[in-house]
Amino acid sequence: MKKTDLTILGGGWAGLLCALLSRNKNPDITINVFEKDSYEERGGLLRSEVESGFTFDIGGPHILFSRNRIILEKIVSILGENVRQHERKAIVRYKGQNVPYPFENGLYTLKPEERVILGSDLIKAMIKSAGNPEWTPKTFEDWIFGYFGGSIARDYLMPYNRKIWKEEPSNMDADWVYSPGRLPFPEVDEIVRSIAGLPSIGYKEQATFYYPVKGGIQALYDSLLEKVTKNDIDVIFGTEIRSCKKEHNSWLINGNFRSSSVISTLPLRTINRVFDLSDEAAASVSKLTYNKDIVVGVALKVPTPDYSIMYVPQSDVPFHRLTWMSSLIPVDSRGQSNLIAETTVSQNDSLDNRNIVNETISGLIKLGIIKSESDVIFSKQWVNELAYPIYNNGHENFRYNALSYLKNMGIKSVGRWGSWHYWNTDKVYEAVENLVNMQ
């Protein structure tokens, strides 16, 4: 029976990073990675497809930015020469108008009367929170109203977050919005400029971002995979982990592989299928919730607009965000473009009675992006079962119980799903690096 020094469970972004960074730290150990998906379906949420010359990120858009410049440089370096810097051009669709993102910095595009209403509520909320630094919001809704004021909360943030999370913000914990790098907080000077009707830039760490020149975001995953395999790390695709048990000071995996140590990037909610959990740990993982993400790719007979991303809070359009892929990777044919639109559904919701593609095209018409279905060249749908971990009430206790139990067993767990955190690629890289450095 083959035995390795280190086995990584899960071969997505987090799993491959664990393998490569562990190799860099320990050049002489043997490492392998098990991944459930086949090689043809590799990448997890970092998957892309090219069809008829149009590139689609089928796991949703993943532009590369970070407050941590060192981490960002490390991620970008994985792509080598296959990378380009872009200027952020994102908008919020607000009452039929395109407002620059972030919304609070884009107020300058609105009428003076509306700027006063939205801006005064925002300033009052900022003054109140600054004057009471000990105040801690109990729910996500508390945080939205407490930091952005009632007007922006009611007209934008509450409806938008209901759409993406399929949950009332009052039923969600607030602790995640305090995570460094997760949700930036507006700068007072820039907000004052915006209310005064002067152009303003917010979330400056996102003002520029990086993205592959070709191949879509899949190029990032594939470049990392190439580095992993070149470092004598065995990545085994198409192998689902069914069991992992401690026997004789080593781990027995699927009954026929042995490893001295194990790092898991498996979704916490599913670990009861793999590890022998206590009743408390099993109960905790069952309470972790998530949303699916339905990504619809649409190729169009219209030119690419002057923005890349649109956030859509209005309830009569199914998708919460659309991304013009042709702004990231231009198409060859003039006057043509392509986009992806994301619609979330709750984990237990069935799609049997819905046609998300038709709903998406109707939404594009309603927003004035296309005039009719005749503007559509083709469309395609992809379903991402695990897309957004939800910070439901009690989330932190549930994940703590699960992670503590794994830790006591000798298993470290990391990644968006291995930590059950709404993390971007940079936060996952940072978490993996910290874990490997502590080993």
Image: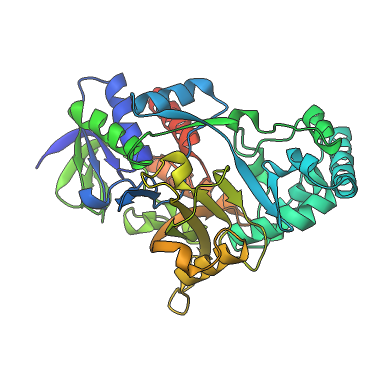
Q: Most extreme residue toward the front, as rendered?
A: 334
| Whole-percent x, y for residue 6 in the image | 25, 33
**Residue lying at 58% horizontally and 43% vertically, measured from the top left:** 307
In this picture, residue 261 sits left or right of residue 200: left
**Residue lying at 49% horizontally and 49% vertically, measured from the top left:** 303
Any part of residue 348 in sight: no
The one of 48 and 243 positioned closer to us in this rendering: 48
In this picture, residue 335 sits left or right of residue 147: left
Q: Most extreme residue toward the bottom, as rendered?
A: 353
| Whole-percent x, y for residue 369 in the image | 57, 58
The quadrant holding residue 12 is top left
Report the label total.
0
- Quadrant including the N terminus: top left
| Whole-percent x, y for residue 127 in the image | 88, 36
| Whole-percent x, y for residue 107 in the image | 78, 42
The one of 359 and 383 positioned closer to us in this rendering: 359
Examine the rendered structure and indicate whether residue 322 appears above or below residue 381.
Answer: above
- The type of colouring in the image is rainbow
The one of 99 and 189 positioned closer to us in this rendering: 99
- Quadrant including the C terminus: top left
Examine the rendered structure and indicate whether residue 213 appears above or below residue 390.
Answer: above
In this picture, residue 127 sits left or right of residue 61: right
The quadrant holding residue 115 is top right
Any part of residue 225 in sight: yes
**Residue lying at 84% horizontally and 32% vertically, measured from the top left:** 192
The one of 165 and 307 positioned closer to us in this rendering: 307
